[in-house]
Image (cartoon, rainbow, N blue to C red):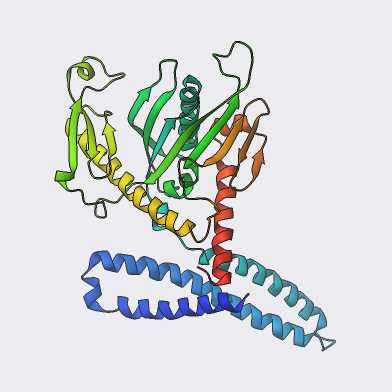
Amino acid sequence: MTPLLRDQFERLALRLAELDATLSDPAVAGDIQRWRALSREQSEAQGIVGRYRRYQQRESDLAAAREMQADPEMAEMAREEIASASADLERLQAELQAALVPRDPDDERNAFLEIRAGTGGDESALFAGDLARMYLRHCERKGWRTEVLSQSDSELGGYKELVLRIEGNSASPAVYGEMRFESGGHRVQRVPATESQGRIHTSACTVAVMPEPDEAEEVQLNPADLRIDTFRASGAGGQHVNKTDSAIRITHLPTGLVAECQDDRSQHRNKAKAMAVLAARLREKDRSERAAKEAATRKGLIGSGDRSDRIRTYNFPQGRITDHRINLTLYKLGAVMDGDLSEVTEALRAARAAEQLALLESGEA
């Protein structure tokens, strides 16, 4: 373990002592929101510091076992202890390194997922439908709940645009933490259904994933900055859909950002959902601008999530999917399109964690 990492753990131990003292103050208990935040930080710090103390103990055990090797009567026992302590140290170091990787507080949030058809005309819209099916299947596998907030259908099938809300569960709450890597440009290479001569075409869609804000932390929107329009929802829903202006479109005038919802029969509920999407888009705009500034000094492994980035290619003739950010190629396109994104997602998360850890060890973080 490098001296820099040891220093990180020692500072965390000092922070834990501060948290213990702060939480024992009766005045802090009166501020429920602050108390909960400090309690979560204390719980995480206790786990990490506990592992670090165990690591130090096994280092001492290893040093003692090596000294025992000089005694012929203790040599066999010493060799066993050396093997055991070395294995423990390797495991604990890996756990400690993973624990040091900064956690994005948004990772545990629910998410909004937007899919938009791009270059490629009707084929792009069909591919947007395929991506939507892929993500919905993935959510089913995870046990996540999905809700369509708005959609614009294409004439030949698929979507010009689709906005989903994805809600996690107790077993797998980190929706945004997993889905965040899907933001960017998705390119498909295949023979379209409309192609009569069997030629391979290339088209693209863009995907944006945004964390759902907490109500308490939601962006404060000035009513004077909003234009709210009502209109009749399109799609399935019977006579009510055709006769009632229940769909809502909200435009944020300073930025030009637009959010709409036509999912619910209640205009009030549609307005609330559209406001939540708009708040998420404003937060994401701010996040992207900050990321762009950071990228000017250091390019991130995962990228800024800019929608013009080509992050992934789906090659149907070869049954191949390639994630260009980490040069990952898998010949299991059918499984991926059926919602099995686990291998891709885990590789992206591991790559991001490795980069963050490298920055910590170099002292740049």
Q: Is residue 344 above or below residue 47?
A: above
x, y percentage for residue 16? 41, 77
Q: Is residue 356 above or below residue 119?
A: below
x, y percentage for residue 277? 30, 41
Q: Quadrant of residue 106?
A: bottom left
Q: Quadrant of the N terminus?
A: bottom right
**Residue farthest to the front, as pictured:** 296
Q: Nearer the viewer, residue 352 or 80?
A: 352
**Residue farthest to the left, as pictured:** 224
Q: How many numbered tags mark residues here?
A: 0
- Is residue 188 shown to the viewer in this render? yes
Horizontal side, residue 147 vs residue 187: left or right? left
**Residue farthest to the right, as pictured:** 72
x, y percentage for residue 176? 42, 47
Q: Is residue 310 above or below residue 120?
A: below
Q: Nearer the viewer, residue 291 or 111?
A: 291
In the image, what residue occupies the spot 58% across and 43% down? 344
Horizontal side, residue 166 vs residue 228: left or right? right
In the image, what residue occupies the spot 60% across and 24% down? 190
In the image, what residue occupies the spot 64% across and 78% down? 58
Q: Quadrant of residue 72?
A: bottom right
In the image, what residue occupies the spot 60% across and 27% down? 189
Q: Is residue 67 above or below residue 279?
A: below
**Residue farthest to the top, as pictured:** 196
Q: Quadrant of residue 56?
A: bottom right
x, y percentage for residue 246? 19, 26
Q: Nearer the viewer, residue 347 or 222?
A: 222
- Is residue 266 shown to the viewer in this render? no
